[in-house]
Structure formats: structure tokens, C-alpha cells
Image (cartoon, rainbow, N blue to C red):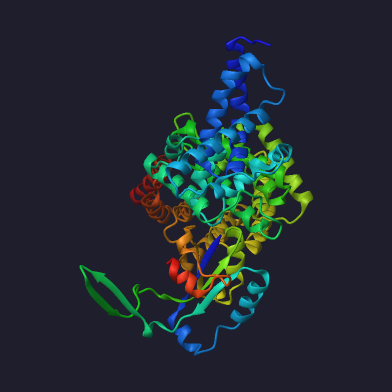
Amino acid sequence: MNLSPDAVRQEVERVYRAESRVILASLIRLLGDFDVAEEASQEAFACALEKWPAEGIPRNPRAWLISVGRFRGLDVVRRASRIDSSLDLHTLSAPGEESFDAVLDAVPDDDLRLIFTCCHPALSLDARVALTLREVCGLSTEEISRAFLSNPVTIAQRIVRAKTKIRQAGIRFEVPDNSELPERLDSVLQVIYLVFNEGYSASFGDSLTRSDLSAEAIRLGELISDLTKDSEAFGLTALMLLQESRRHARSSVNGDIVTLEYQDRSLWDGQMIRRGREYLSRAYELGDIGIYTLQAAIAEVHAGAASSEATDWNRIVSLYDLLLSVNPSPVIELNRGVAVAMAQGFEEGLAILDAILAAGSLQDYAPLHSARADFFRRLGRFSEAAECYRRAIDLTRQEPEQRFLTGRLEACTSVCVEDFEN
Amino acid sequence: MTYMLLVYLEECRMVGMGDAAPKGCDGLAERLMDSGNYVSGGILQPTLTATTLRVREGQRMITDGPFAETREQLAGFLLVEAEDLDVAMSIAAEHPVAQFGSIEIRPLREVPLLKPMTHDHSEGDSVAKA
């Protein structure tokens, strides 16, 4: 069967787009080394371009590519071990006697194995994030460094160090067993949420790359939920979908911040909210409600409210109470304080925020100062509000956030001047 | 793979223990011998007894005390065979000092000459290889 080179090229490209990450994940497991697997995968696709025109497209292109990649990879290791005798063929080679069917049976979990390996808690959080984006999501080091406003050389070094540690410290390409799963899954969810937040909170910078990061995080969340059936994985995915649904309402046409209260709720993405709710109800069904599911539940209350006034703030306060009982944190106390202010009044909210400020750990946390400023402003205490806005501006590095706070500060100081003149 | 578990803790706790091993160390060593993970282990005298030596341009330079002046000091070690880092981490988590000190887990290089002595080798054999 002879196919035109064009038809073959198109098919190879299609398989590459759809399957190259999964094929790489399998080759990493089979060859036990990231770089050897990367090279082997490239060679397998090159080989397909060469052979498929004459031999026809195999029935299972993925299996074909993994099989060819595996042999090419073993060749790479053999060549390297001849040049560099310190490379031990034994530690890098695949289990030889295993039948290829058994090798392929393991493939559906290779994605998951790779995620768990890249997010191993023995790697630093920065390294886990960079390695996951590079190996699981297939982002280039340049793309990762742009997204994290970092230097490509730094990111590349971080990835190389992480790969070296995985190889030399004996981190295996395996899904952890049940006794280790909770700790290891926490580490994975933490990486996913960090990637999402990086894409979400700073979406005003290089907006295109950054929304890509959020999309990648949601994709990983869906994948890990599907593969582990863990309630917190579903909770995290629900949380990300519900937050992401507000993306288009969060900034005005000229890039200014629009806070939740003033967002045009018709701009919220209804389909994403529906998907978020589906994930949230799966999390509820599975039980073991944790921090991500509770945060998703709070986001869901907002998603269902027609306006800030129509929001069930009392329900939000009780969800924050639950969240605090699972995971005490001053930042969650702050969020609870804001919910209390909306539910009961700004005096009550202010009392909570003052207590958090006095406790000391959030003294340099800009959102605490901007929340206090906002409460003072609403209570008509404009000079105190202005003072808090100044403090918040000093502590904020994001440009749109600074613009937003400066606008508020100017409004407060002009009122103060009027007061004085009257 | 062979892993070295370096046990660190605050000096005052080391001194306070006298000659006794931290509670639970013996039990851990026994369990590791039964499971075949144990290679070797030991508890160090306090840093008061330490001498640091360097040779520079043929000259021996000797300092009283340990090399690094940190809050936690090396207090002992455990050498184990483990199939991967996760297994080594589980062993470290069982170490009683992990509750109040810290355990640094370092894989040994897979260089045959530096393979640790195991019970199968006679001492003379290993010395000859080294």
C-alpha cells in the first residue's frame, strides 16, 4: 500500500498533536530517562515519516511509535554508555523480558505516572511547576519563563536539576501506592493550583500566555480527577472552572480591574460554571470534603447570585468557618472578614480585620490593607481610608492593581479636601 | 540503590541523651535488618569531640570542632538499601529523630569501588579494593 507523502505527513502531524505527550510519557517510563525519551520520541516520529508511505499507516499508530521509540532509545543508551562508561546501561534500560503487550497495557496510566514523578514532593515547588509544564504540558522553556516573568536560563537550569535529581536520587516513574497517595496527590494539586493562579491572578500582563496557563491547569485538573477519582481533585477542578468563568468580567476594556461586586455578571461563562458545578457535585458525592472543595463551594455561591446584594453572604461566612476549621490561615480569616462585612455590616468586618492586623502575620499583605481601606471608605471615614490605600499601593507590585487603588485613593482624598473646605 | 540517611539534631539534645541511643533507634535497626534494608548505622559523639582537618599545599590544617556552624549538627547515620527514594523516605520517616531533628537522604553514587561494605564481604577484601 503506497500513500502519498503528503497524506502520510498529515497523518503523522495529526498523531503528533494528539499523542506526542502520551507517547513521551510512556517512553520516559520505558527508558527511565527524560532526555533519552525525548530523543527517542523525535526519532520515532521521523521514522514514521520514512516508513509509513511504503508500509502504510499502522493499525495502532501510538503503539507503533512507542515500540519504535523504545528500540531507538535503547540504542541511544547503548551508544552513550560506550562513550561515557559512567552511564550504567542496567539502570537506564527497560525491563527486557517483559512482553510488549504488557508494556502497552500500562500505557493508559503513563500520563498519571509522569505527573506524579514531576510533582514528587522531594523536588522544590518551583522545580515541580517548571518540570510539569515542560514535560506534561509540553510548554517550551521560553514559554514557561515568559509566563513566570523569569529568565529562560533559570528555568532551563531548574528543569535540568530536577531531572538529574529524579535520575540520581532514585525517584521512580510510578503512581504511588495507597499509603503514600494522599501526600503525593496534595503535592500534585498544589502544583496545578499554583499554575492556575499564575495564569489567573496576573492575567493583565502578557494576557495570552497567561490564560493558556490557566487552561493547562484546568486540563491537568480534569485529567487527575478522571484518573484518581479523588474528591479534592474534583474540588480543585471545580474551583478553577468557577474562577475562570469570571475571566472576561474581571477587567474592563482598558485593562482596569473590576472587582466581583461591580462585575457585569452576564459576561460570566455559563458553560464553564455548569462544568464547575458538575465537578463540585462529584466532589460532594465522593465525600472527604477538603480545602479545594470548600473554596469551590464558596465560588459556586457567587456563581449562582444575580448580584452582590443578592448573594447569600451568610452561607459564605459559614463555608469560611468550615474552611478555617480544616485549614487555619490568616488569609482565610481575612476573606471571612470580608464576607462578614457583606453579611452583617462594615463595622463588624472592620473589627475582624483589625484583629488580623494586630495579630501581625499579614502586616505586609496588600489585600488586607486594601480591604480595610474599602471598609473605611464605605463607612465614610475617608482620611483613614486614604491612609490604608497608600499602604496597599506601597505593597502592590501589579500595575493594574496599583492603578485601581490609586483611583480609589484620589477619590478619598478629594472628599477629604471637600470636608476640610466646608 | 544505597541511601545514606544523615541524622541531624540540636546539639543540646545530643548531649542530654548521654550514651543511650534515642528511644526507638534499636527497634528501627532491627526491623531494617529483618526486611533486608539495613547496611550499617551509627551514633556520633557530640561535636565537642570533633576535629576538622584539611590538607592545603601539603600542610595539614586542623580545627577544633565541626566544619559547619549550624544550629543542627550531624548526630548519626544510617546506611540502607532501598528500591527507590520513596522507600528511603518511608524509612527516614520511621526514624525517631525525624520527630524533632531532621534526616537528610542522600543516594550513594553507583560506583563499584565505593560500594559500601556489606556483610557478604570480608573486611580485608573491601580494604584491598579501596
Q: Is residue A250 above or below residue A333?
A: above
The image quadrant that residue A107 belongs to is top right
| Front position in the image: A158 or A60 | A60
Is residue A71 visible in the rendered image? The answer is yes
Outermost bottom residue? B18
At x 63% / y 58%, what residue is drawn? A183
Q: State how many labels appear.
A: 0
| Front position in the image: A156 or A312 | A156
The image quadrant that residue A333 belongs to is bottom right
Report x, y in % for residue A264. Answer: 58, 33
Is residue B7 visible in the rendered image? The answer is no
User: From the viewer's perspective, is A422 left or right of A300?
Assistant: left
| Front position in the image: A317 or A282 | A282
- Quadrant where the C terminus of chain B sits is bottom left
Report x, y in % for residue A205. Answer: 43, 36
At x 58% / y 11%, what residue is drawn? A6
Report x, y in % for residue A151. Answer: 37, 41
| Front position in the image: A324 or A70 | A70
Q: Is residue A228 above or below residue A178?
A: above
- Quadrant where the N terminus of chain B sits is bottom right
At x 54% / y 88%, what residue is drawn? B20
The image quadrant that residue A268 belongs to is top right
User: From the viewer's perspective, is A89 left or right of B12?
Assistant: right
Q: Is residue A55 above or below residue B64?
A: above
Report x, y in % for residue A395. Answer: 39, 52
